[in-house]
């Protein structure tokens, strides 16, 4: 869910909260529909190295993390699982690190943007755990 704050006159009030810093995307065209779909994106990603196994797709809002009206953009991703490192322990904290090649697209135009190596970490212990978002994998 995205929350937007307005004053009594309907003017946008930017949030300075790091975790709830929403805004709008500035579009330079009249096109207001996404021009990308999974089939098109996979076809283009294959031209950039995608092998087509263990593939997932998702649309994500990426904030620019500033308190302005235009504060982010949508990106469409094709993610291909390339490796999984299991560090399972009977006692203490366990971890699974999943590694991905991620192909990003501008969803408004369908333009291929870049390929990134990323990872996701799932970690847990007796009383707590977490799953990260996708993180850069250096």
Image (tube, grey):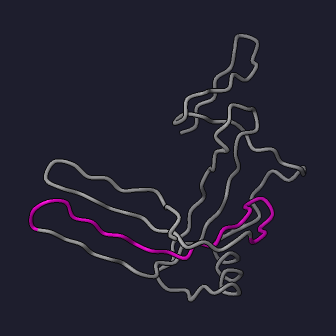
118 up-or-down from 92: above or below:
below
* Residue depicted at x 46% and y 78%: 81
Residue 65: horizontal and vertical position, in percent?
64, 40
Residue 51: horizontal and vertical position, in percent?
56, 89
Residue 36: horizontal and vertical position, in percent?
72, 67
Residue 111: horizontal and vertical position, in percent?
78, 69
- Judged left or right of residue 83, residue 65 is right
The picture quadrant where one finds residue 15 is top right
90 up-or-down from 44: above or below:
above
Of 80 and 128, the residue lying toward us: 128
Magenta segment: 90-112
* Residue depicted at x 63% and y 36%: 22
Residue at the limit of the structure toward the left, as seen here: 91
* Residue depicted at x 65% and y 74%: 115
Residue at the limit of the structure toward the top, as seen here: 8
- Judged left or right of residue 93, residue 133 is right
The picture quadrant where one finds residue 98 is bottom left
Residue at the limit of the structure toward the front, as seen here: 138
User: Residue 44 lies in magenta, yes or no?
Assistant: no
């Amino acid at each position: 869910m995205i929350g937007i704050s307005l004053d009594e006159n309907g003017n946008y009030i930017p949030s300075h909260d790091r975790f709830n810093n929403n805004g709008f995307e500035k579009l330079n065209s009249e096109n207001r529909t996404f021009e990308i779909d999974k089939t098109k994106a996979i076809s283009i990603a294959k031209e950039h190295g995608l092998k087509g196994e263990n593939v997932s797709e998702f649309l994500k809002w990426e904030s620019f993390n500033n308190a302005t009206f235009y504060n982010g953009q949508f990106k469409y991703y094709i993610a291909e699982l390339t490796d999984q490192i299991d560090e399972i322990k009977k006692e203490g904290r366990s971890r699974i690190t999943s590694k991905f090649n991620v192909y990003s697209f501008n969803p408004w135009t369908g333009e291929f943007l870049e390929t990134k190596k990323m990872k996701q970490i799932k970690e847990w212990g007796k009383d707590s755990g977490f799953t990260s978002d996708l993180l850069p994998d250096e």
